Image: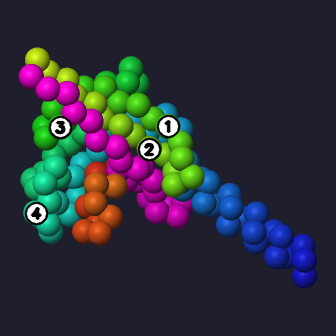
């Protein structure tokens, strides 16, 4: 019985790690805004938008413009910081990227309360 419980615990931990901690190769790609019309929250796009994360650490976005990104890991999971600079100001946002329990594409969570996210499409 102890071996069965131990085996189940190992499976659950493995699934959690696989769903929560993504490598840079898993994160790089094109993300499309989903469920963007449900809230009126400042700093969140309320229209269809696309973010492209490139291997060289740069990104493009219609809402957050162009800039650079960093990836790091916390107990919550994989984090991404999008940074943008222009001659007048600099800004950055930090978001968690994860996938739904092993299956599904990675998602950049914008607002978990309203289920707003960018879903990776390639």
The image shows residue 32 at horizontal and vertical percentages of 24, 48
* Residues at marks 4 and 1, CA–CA distance in whole angstroms: 29 Å
Q: Secondary structure at mark 3?
A: loop
Res 73 visible: yes
Q: Secondary structure at mark 1?
A: strand
Q: Which mark is residue 64?
A: 3
Residue where numbered disc 2 is placed: 79
* Residues at marks 1 and 3, CA–CA distance in whole angstroms: 20 Å
Image: magenta residue range: 88-108
* Residues at marks 2 and 3, CA–CA distance in whole angstroms: 17 Å
Q: Nearer the viewer, residue 99 or 88?
A: 88
Mark 4 / mark 3, whichever is N-terminal: 4
Mark 2 / mark 1, whichever is N-terminal: 1
Residue 116 lies within the magenta run:
no
Residue 96 lies within the magenta run:
yes
Looking at this rendering, what residue extends furthest in the front direction?
A: 89
Q: Is 26 situated left or right of 107 in this image? A: right
Q: Secondary structure at mark 4?
A: loop
Q: Residue at x 46, y 63 (%)?
A: 100
Q: Is residue 37 above or below residue 108?
A: below
Mark 2 / mark 3, whichever is N-terminal: 3
Q: Which mark is residue 40?
A: 4
* Residues at marks 4 and 3, CA–CA distance in whole angstroms: 17 Å
Mark 4 / mark 1, whichever is N-terminal: 4
Q: Which mark is residue 122?
A: none
Residue where numbered disc 1 is placed: 72
Q: Is residue 24 above or below residue 3?
A: above
Q: Is 57 situated left or right of 13 in this image? A: left
Q: Residues within 10 Å of mark 3 (few under 14, many from 20)?
A: many
Residues marked 2 and 1 touching at CB (< 8 Å): yes
């Amino acid at each position: 019985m102890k071996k069965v419980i131990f085996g189940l615990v190992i499976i659950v931990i493995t699934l959690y790690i696989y769903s929560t901690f993504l490598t840079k190769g898993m994160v790089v790609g094109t993300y499309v805004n989903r469920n963007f019309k449900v809230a009126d929250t400042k700093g969140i796009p309320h229209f269809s938008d696309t973010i492209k994360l490139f291997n060289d650490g740069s990104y493009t976005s219609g809402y957050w413009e162009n800039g650079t990104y960093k990836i790091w890991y916390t107990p919550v999971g994989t984090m991404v910081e999008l940074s943008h600079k222009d001659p007048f100001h600099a800004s950055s946002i930090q978001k968690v990227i994860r996938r739904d329990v092993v299956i599904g594409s990675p998602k950049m969570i914008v607002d978990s309360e309203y289920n707003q996210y960018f879903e990776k499409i390639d």
